[in-house]
Image: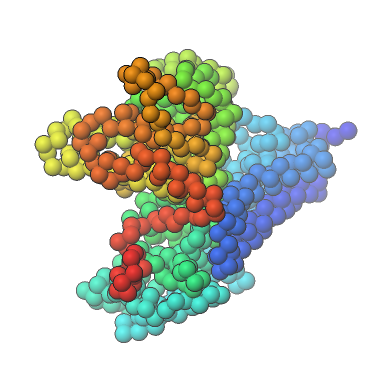
Amino acid sequence: MVTQRLDAPQAWDIAKAMIDGFNRHYSLFRTESARAKHRFETQDWHGQQRAQRERIEFYDLRVRECVRRLEKEYHAGSLPMAVWHQIKLHYIGLLVEHRQPELAETFFNSVTTKILHRTHFHNDFIFVRPAVSTEYLEDDASARPSWRAYYPQPEKLAATLRRVIEDFELQCPFEDLERDIGYVHAVIEPRIAALILRANFQIQVLASLFYRNKGAYLVGKLINGYTELPFALPILHADDGRLFIDAALFGEEDLLALFSFARAYFMVDMDVPSAYVQFLRSLMPRKPVAELYNAIGLAKQGKTLFYREFLSHLKHSSDRLRIAPGIKGMVMLVFDLPSFPYVFKLIKDRFPPPKDTTREQVQSKYLLVKHHDRVGRMADTLEYSLVALPRERFSDELIAELLREAPSQIEISDRDGDGHQEVIIRHLYIERRMVPLNLYLQEAFDAGLDHPASRAQVEQAVIEYGNAIKDMVAANIFPGDMLWKNFGMTRGGRVVFYDYDEIEYLTDCQFRAVPPPRNEDDELSGEVWWPVAPRDVFPETFAPFLLGHPLVRECFLRHHGDLLTPEYWQAHKERIQQGHLYDVFPYGPERRFSVVRDDASGVEG
């Protein structure tokens, strides 16, 4: 039997058990991230992708482990609330010298809410806001510096660049490091030639490379006076296993593309994650801190920070949540807050024909995308349960839509008895807001295609749409529903897919040609008269649904007509089944030094 009072030593023991649970999690997380270097050096690409997928599950596994321990050893769910106040205070004390205090606070929240069965983020027993600062955590003499500084003389910049590369101690030889440094120097030189080099002229680089798929990325910045220039150098393997620097990415836009919310998480060996995030924020000041934590694989921390930011935004704004603009989906109900750059999506209770799916199947599709390489073409999603929001921030039309389409997911209550109602949403996805591609095209049509800017907008959208599909194909993904409304245009002019309820692995689909008609009735029929299995796909049939407008059709056929042939899809499917991993770069082919090198040697790039 558990008593109604717990003395201080036992409260301390529970706090210590929780920090031990977090430390075990981060130790495993960091060990797996550090192994990415060896997998890169040995070209274990399938192992790298498998590790990226499996690492996503580490957090939930450790939370469940900790919950089981606390229930078994301390009957934690039966403890009075006064004890949990005491436990939290002990836990804060354990974080004072900790190098990942913000992550440990989130871990405490995850464990505590599971044990106490709390349904809302706001209560006295979790960290609603940070209790421990993450500033200057590296001042401990034993801490490994998160970044290194180099002070080149202008005439010795190339030599300094070489030392920057060599200090990462990659256990593979370069094809020709002097040649590659020459390429990088040629890109840097025009950017600093017109500058007066100040006394603080330096190069700062993060101490760990960033690993993703087949690439390793060196991330840093050039500093001169008050000017800072972000950069990243992708390092790849040649066919013979030797290394080469593939490009030099410079400026915030290049870094934003590299760290896009539509790409897989990096694997980075970090002792003090907050120091890495602070450095990255100096390179990309417009990128939310939550998305930076996501990008380095700390998605739970990203969720915590996102929710804090959203609550703060609600406090400092007055507009209302509304039904999102665009064509309504049959599976997902989508709403947004006009002043906040995200959309909120929940699964409807019922799906009209021809949709034949279940809530569980839809959730499995979103989980598939979370674990998969998103190749810059599939939006990352934040998944929340039991989200409580003030009723007055919902438009009446949205409340009516929620109660009509998803009543099982909605509860409206006056929890505190003070007359202020809350809307509690049981399950919710949140994504970056984009302009739906059908609306982006319609905007150009409405402006008039006799205007060159409107025609250019249509052509850009169509080319990017086809590129998005081809990048997903390279990642073994068939989007399923390829209608324009299921794709969005980002701020950077990139088309991204965001509707996942019909997504499939390419290798699970059968791509077939439409059989010839058997008779005149078949030829005149507007219906499908040939047999179709559940995962049969007929690329020829895409055209009537996608290419109704003459300009769209002409542009699509000119750039992406191969997408309407079964041969294109079958060829990629066969190569993937043979174990081939396609390269999908977070920068254009014109940025690649290998194209310059191949052109110079007469080899086709």
Look at the picture and state if 372 lies above or below 224. Answer: above
Quick one: 306 or 603, which is closer to the camera? 603
Position of residue 101 measured from the top left corner of the image (x, y, whole percent): 60, 54
Name the one closer to the observer, 519 or 92: 519
Q: Quadrant of residue 386?
A: top right
Q: Name which residue lies at 53% across and 63% down.
A: 136
Residue 112, compared with residue 389, is above or below; it is: below
In this picture, residue 58 sits left or right of residue 159: right
Residue nearer the viewer, 173 or 409: 173
Quarter occupied by the N terminus? top right
Judged from this view, the residue extending furthest toward the front is 519
Residue 274 seen:
no
- Residue 217 is situated, as x and y percent measured from the top left of the image, at 46, 64
Give how far across and how far down residue 114 sits, in percent: 68, 36
**Residue 283 in the image: above or below residue 334:** below
Q: Point out the image quarter for the C terminus.
A: bottom left
Residue at image point 55% right, 45% down: 371
Q: Nearer the viewer, residue 266 or 286?
A: 266
Q: Residue at x 59, y 43 (%)?
A: 127
| Left or right of 57 in this view: 383 | left
- Most extreme residue toward the left is 450
Q: Is residue 167 rendered to the left or right of residue 229?
A: right
Residue at the (78%, 33%) spot, across then down: 78
Instruction: Answer yes or no: is residue 358 visible.
Output: yes
Q: Position of residue 553 (x, y in %)?
A: 25, 36
